[in-house]
């Protein structure tokens, strides 16, 4: 009995790694790679390709942070999480950050002990239906069967929406996006509800995308963004500003193509600060001075990432809409870099 | 400890070497270590919960749940408290487990007997089914059935229509639901009276047969009583029962009762998977009855059917019941795999949706485990009682 | 009969009886026809069953064979090569490596192959009768092999490090099942001994653990290891997700293993215990040398069956986010280039599992027959 307990304790001690140290940034640096929680697969946002390489809009946020810390977008390990496993994974420190279309809400920010470090996608919950149903508005959906992800804000918004409008519905719940898509495709439900970006992504993978239409109503605000554990402000700043760098770069017209020229010749003081030509901004975060340059050089600015993964020329085909810069009629707005 | 017996004789041995003393010492040590371990876990947990600002306690049970469920045996809506969601999910687990156990037992017995059939084709047919079902993971079978049900059943507008009252499509099986009028309780009472009557007649008939050898047509009498009495009561009270029929309105059928496809797929998978194991158990049980028993029964001139019923099955049951119990328990536990296809049972709702919405992992998982513990213990107790009843009584 | 006749007919002429050569049995009683008559058409009821059976086979088999083989596509590069309308096995062959190894880096895939191959080779060697050095191979399998396999899979000693989230596919299935069964054996034996211990405290703790774990579904144990285990540990400590799942699976199968081992212990005649005690052995010596070797030998078939059960149950880890074979397939069918091939993926998964599980169950039946020394009819 004693030996067993001793052995067990020893065994446990062997595997318990990475005990609390100064901060997540130091842990990440010591480990040599970033661990980033993503979805289990949502086209355009995070999905592995034939080679098993992850790509997508959310994945780019992870890559930006990894580039900021290490100067190398490959130094990141992706942990696929489900709607159920994402929060425990971050709480337990199994992942350093989450970048998986997670809505910023009061409860998650306060009660679950997380810190949202910005918004990379302004979204809203919408409905998708078959065209042949002839439905033009979400207010005509009384009595419909609705496919929805379990354990999400979507599920609660759905209940609120139908209750507020005195309509009835039958929920059909699943845990993963691809399960919902299969069921919706098989006509298990009339309506598919999730964030409108997700609807667009899923619509592209239905057997006949043109037979389906996304209804105009947006029933909720869904600010999606990366999040980290509460309390480690340095790490929170690193993630926040890695994302902001991509947005600021778009504002300033810096792209992965012209970033070298800009660094060499730009006279704009904000660009010079951003690219580490003037001032010591990186080191204040505990990073190299050319961290932002590296992010723009390898991952690109916000617009490049958007166009590459979810933009109108991809199968997802999402217009910029509210995610355009504030100067272009959208609400994307990053604090100034100074 | 075995050594204890040896050392009892030598009283003057050093107490350090006394096995009884050592046994006490070991046990105290174990208790101390165990308590320390629990305290360590508890303090870690408390610390972690505080650090991460996770709420604790069961206060959330009264708050409105806010989410809907596709299938419920009780009255439930988004405004119902979490506690209702809990009751609902427990009932759903029990519902599918109960139906699954009954069906799996019947199908399992049929296939077990088929496997032993002297007919080569029938025996091989059973063998292929038994081996396939036993050697493919249940989760995969659930997904297969679900996928199959969704694609094989017709779409909503092309529902299979049986007499304008039962509709089958890939949204579910829609049936009329009964509406009980006043006086229906008398029908229920009549049924109960009939059941009690049948039990008494059976006992009386068995006694009379032992005493006089005369047989009494128990089966037909029982059938007559159980059907006749409630029908009579039904007629006397003026048929206090009406039906609510499902009808296609707008997007879906409304009214009536519905069995959702998730339920059907899960039931099919659970039943066929467990039935395969039960089939093997039944086969092994029948084979375990010595062939001499059959021969002796034939020598006494008992017909094959009666031999099976009175000689083979009662003996085989002794071998069959203990492993059957664990299959019943397995089926109940396996119903938790519904989490993969969205049938709202305990794990899917309580350890899934609610855990995620409230973030109170410890409370949710603890409650889930306690429910399963209770169900398992109840089934065990019942089956142990049944096992004792049919056990071989020796002089 | 013939001899009787001669003895009665008279003594003068002792006729020698020459029996007529045996007639061949009627064609309806032997060969295929005879077999069919005996096994398929012995009476009208049996004949009816046979016809129903043949009809069922006719209903089920041709469509499946047609889909899976005759009108299926086997070679090609992309979705466009699947034109014949049957199964598109191209999908499986293109993704085959990913299904087997998950995200394990391509350049390093020889390592898991070597580890699993070495393990299988040693196992088969140990289970073969009458080969030399079995004992040493078994010892190698018990002690150094897990360590070697761990370093091979995870890296170290010059091999690049491969993190556990990259382990996936069938490899992960094998890793979880083997680790689960290997670690559950010692824990299970300890629990079984504890359950039969005469010290009430130890017995109570063991019974409590065994019965509790056996009463709850594996999925809740996995949830617990996923969600609650991190809360139980000192603040700041961090566990690998795979390791957490492994702990859950090991504890779960240990409870079942304990019951299997207990069955073996109970089957030991009391005389064995008494004889060992009479020779002055203490508890541990008795267990190690007399009881456990015999008890474990008779429960080998049961251990194999619980391994099969565990092997199938590993698919549940997909619910907690690990990417085993089934999860890998679910992930692959969401690839927009290969939409609508879920059936092929699941069929492949089912066939693979069937081959392994069926093989193991046949082996355990063979063992049962070999160990079965009673009389059979």
Image: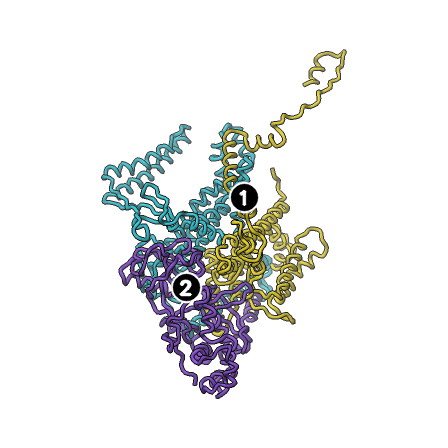
Q: Which mark is drawn over residue B128?
A: 1
Chain that appears purple: A
For label 2, the SS is helix
Q: Is residue B345 left or right of residue C321?
A: left
| Same chain, labels 1 and 2 | no
| Disc 1 residue crowd, few under 14, some 14–19, many 20+, Cα 10 Å | few
Residue wearing tag 2:
A200
Front of the two marks 1 and 2: 2
| Chain identifier matching the yellow colour in the rendered picture | C
Colour applied to chain B: cyan
- Secondary structure beneath dot 1 equals helix
Chain assignment, label 1: B
Report whether B205 appears left or right of C147. Answer: left
Q: Chain of mark 2?
A: A
Instruction: Indicate whether A333 appears above or below A4.
Output: below
Say if mark 1 contacts mark 2, CB within 8 Å. Answer: no
The quarter in which the C terminus of chain C is drawn is top right
Viewer-nearest residue: B118 or A335: A335
């Amino acid at each position: 009995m004693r030996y067993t307990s001793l052995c067990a304790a020893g065994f446990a001690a062997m595997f318990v790694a990475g005990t609390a140290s100064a901060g997540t940034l130091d842990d990440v640096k010591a480990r040599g790679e970033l661990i980033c929680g993503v979805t289990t697969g949502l086209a355009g946002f995070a999905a592995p390709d034939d080679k098993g390489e992850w790509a997508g809009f959310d994945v780019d946020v992870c890559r930006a942070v990894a580039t900021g810390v290490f100067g190398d977008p490959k130094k990141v390990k992706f942990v696929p999480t489900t709607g159920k496993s994402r929060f425990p994974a971050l709480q337990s420190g199994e992942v350093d950050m989450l970048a998986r279309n997670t809505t910023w809400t009061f409860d998650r920010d306060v009660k679950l002990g997380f810190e949202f470090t910005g918004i990379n996608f302004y979204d809203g919950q919408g409905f998708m239906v078959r065209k042949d149903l002839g439905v033009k508005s979400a207010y005509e959906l009384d009595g419909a069967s609705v496919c929805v992800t379990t354990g999400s804000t979507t599920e609660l918004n759905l209940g609120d929406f139908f209750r507020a409008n005195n309509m009835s519905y039958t929920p059909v719940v699943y845990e993963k996006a691809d399960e919902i898509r299969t069921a919706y495709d098989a006509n298990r439900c009339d309506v598919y509800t999730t964030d409108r970006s997700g609807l667009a992504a899923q619509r592209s993978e239905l057997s006949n995308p043109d037979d389906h239409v996304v209804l105009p109503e947006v029933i909720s605000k869904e600010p999606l963004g990366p999040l980290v554990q509460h309390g480690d402000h340095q790490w929170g700043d690193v993630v926040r500003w890695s994302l902001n760098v991509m947005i600021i770069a778009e504002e300033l017209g810096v792209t992965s193509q012209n970033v070298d020229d800009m660094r060499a010749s730009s006279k704009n003081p904000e660009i010079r600060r951003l690219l580490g030509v003037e001032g010591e901004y990186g080191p204040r975060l505990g990073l190299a001075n050319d961290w932002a340059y590296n992010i723009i050089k390898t991952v690109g600015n916000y617009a490049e990432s958007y166009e590459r993964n979810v933009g109108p020329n991809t199968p997802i085909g999402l217009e910029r809409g509210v995610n355009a810069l504030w100067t272009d009629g959208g609400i994307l707005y990053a604090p100034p870099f100074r | 400890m075995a050594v204890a017996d040896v050392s009892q004789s030598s009283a003057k041995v050093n107490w350090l070497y006394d096995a009884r003393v050592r046994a006490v010492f070991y046990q105290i040590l174990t208790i101390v270590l165990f308590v320390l371990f629990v305290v360590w876990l508890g303090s870690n947990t408390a610390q972690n919960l505080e650090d991460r600002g996770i709420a604790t306690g069961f206060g959330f049970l009264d708050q409105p749940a806010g989410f809907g469920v596709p299938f419920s045996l009780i009255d439930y809506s988004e405004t119902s408290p979490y506690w209702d969601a809990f009751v609902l999910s427990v009932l759903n687990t029990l519902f599918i487990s109960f139906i699954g156990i009954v069906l799996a037992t019947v199908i399992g017995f049929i296939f077990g007997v088929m496997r032993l059939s002297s007919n080569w084709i029938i025996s091989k047919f059973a063998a292929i089914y038994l081996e396939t079902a036993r050697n493919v993971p249940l989760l995969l079978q659930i997904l297969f059935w679900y996928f199959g049900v969704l694609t094989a059943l017709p779409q909503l507008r092309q529902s299979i229509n049986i007499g304008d009252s039962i509709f089958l499509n890939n949204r579910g099986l829609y049936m009329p639901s009964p509406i009980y009028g006043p006086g229906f309780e008398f029908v229920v009472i009549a049924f109960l009276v009939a059941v009690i009557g049948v039990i008494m007649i059976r006992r009386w008939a068995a006694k009379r047969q032992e005493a006089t050898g005369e047989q009494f047509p128990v089966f037909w009498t029982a059938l007559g009583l159980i059907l006749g009495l409630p029908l009579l009561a039904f007629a006397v009270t003026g048929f206090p029962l009406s039906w609510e029929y499902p009808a296609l309105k707008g997007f879906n059928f409304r009214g009536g009762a519905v069995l959702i496809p998730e339920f059907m797929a899960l039931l099919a998978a659970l039943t066929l998977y467990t039935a395969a194991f039960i089939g093997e158990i039944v086969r092994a049980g029948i084979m375990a009855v010595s062939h001499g028993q059959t021969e002796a029964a034939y020598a006494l001139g008992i017909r094959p059917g009666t031999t099976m019923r009175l000689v083979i099955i009662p003996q085989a049951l002794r071998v069959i019941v203990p492993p059957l119990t664990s299959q019943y328990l397995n089926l109940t536990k396996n119903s938790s795999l519904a989490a993969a296809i969205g049938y709202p049972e305990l794990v899917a709702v309580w350890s899934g949706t609610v855990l995620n919405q409230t973030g109170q992992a410890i409370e949710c998982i603890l409650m889930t485990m306690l429910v399963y513990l209770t169900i398992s213990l109840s089934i065990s107790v019942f089956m142990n009682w049944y096992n004792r009843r049919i056990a071989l009584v020796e002089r | 009969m013939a001899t009787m006749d001669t003895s009665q007919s008279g003594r003068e002429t002792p006729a020698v009886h020459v029996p007529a050569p045996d007639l061949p049995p009627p064609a309806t009683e032997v060969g295929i026809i005879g077999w069919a008559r005996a096994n398929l058409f012995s009476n009208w009821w049996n004949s009816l069953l046979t016809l129903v059976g043949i009809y069922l086979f006719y209903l089920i088999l041709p469509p499946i064979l047609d889909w899976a083989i005759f009108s299926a596509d086997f070679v090609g590069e992309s979705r466009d090569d699947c034109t014949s309308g049957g199964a598109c096995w191209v999908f499986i062959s293109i993704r085959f490596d990913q299904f087997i190894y998950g995200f394990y880096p391509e350049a390093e895939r020889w390592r898991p192959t070597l580890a699993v191959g070495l393990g299988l080779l040693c196992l088969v060697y140990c289970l073969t009768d009458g080969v030399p050095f079995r004992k040493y191979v078994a010892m190698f399998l018990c002690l150094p092999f897990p360590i070697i396999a761990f370093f091979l899979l995870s890296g170290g000693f010059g091999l690049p490090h491969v993190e556990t989230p990259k382990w996936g596919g069938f490899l992960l299935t094998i890793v979880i099942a083997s680790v689960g069964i290997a670690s559950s054996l010692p824990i299970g034996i300890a629990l079984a001994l504890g359950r039969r211990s005469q010290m009430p405290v130890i017995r109570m703790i063991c019974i409590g653990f065994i019965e509790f774990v056996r009463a709850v579904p594996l999925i809740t144990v996995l949830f617990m290891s996923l969600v609650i285990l991190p809360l139980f540990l000192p603040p700041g400590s961090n566990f690998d997700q795979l390791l957490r799942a492994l702990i859950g699976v090991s504890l779960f199968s240990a409870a079942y293993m304990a019951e299997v081992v207990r069955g073996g212990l109970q089957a030991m005649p009391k005389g064995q215990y008494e004889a060992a005690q009479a020779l002055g052995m203490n508890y541990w010596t008795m267990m190690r040398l007399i009881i456990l070797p015999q008890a474990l030998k008779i429960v080998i078939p049961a251990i194999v069956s619980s391994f099969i059960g565990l092997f199938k149950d590993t698919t549940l880890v997909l619910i907690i986010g690990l990417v085993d074979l089934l999860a890998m397939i679910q992930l692959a069918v969401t690839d927009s280039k290969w939409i609508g091939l879920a059936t092929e993926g699941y069929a492949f998964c089912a066939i693979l599992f069937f081959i392994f599980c069926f093989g193991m169950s046949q082996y355990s039946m063979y063992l049962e027959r070999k160990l079965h020394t009673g009389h059979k009819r």
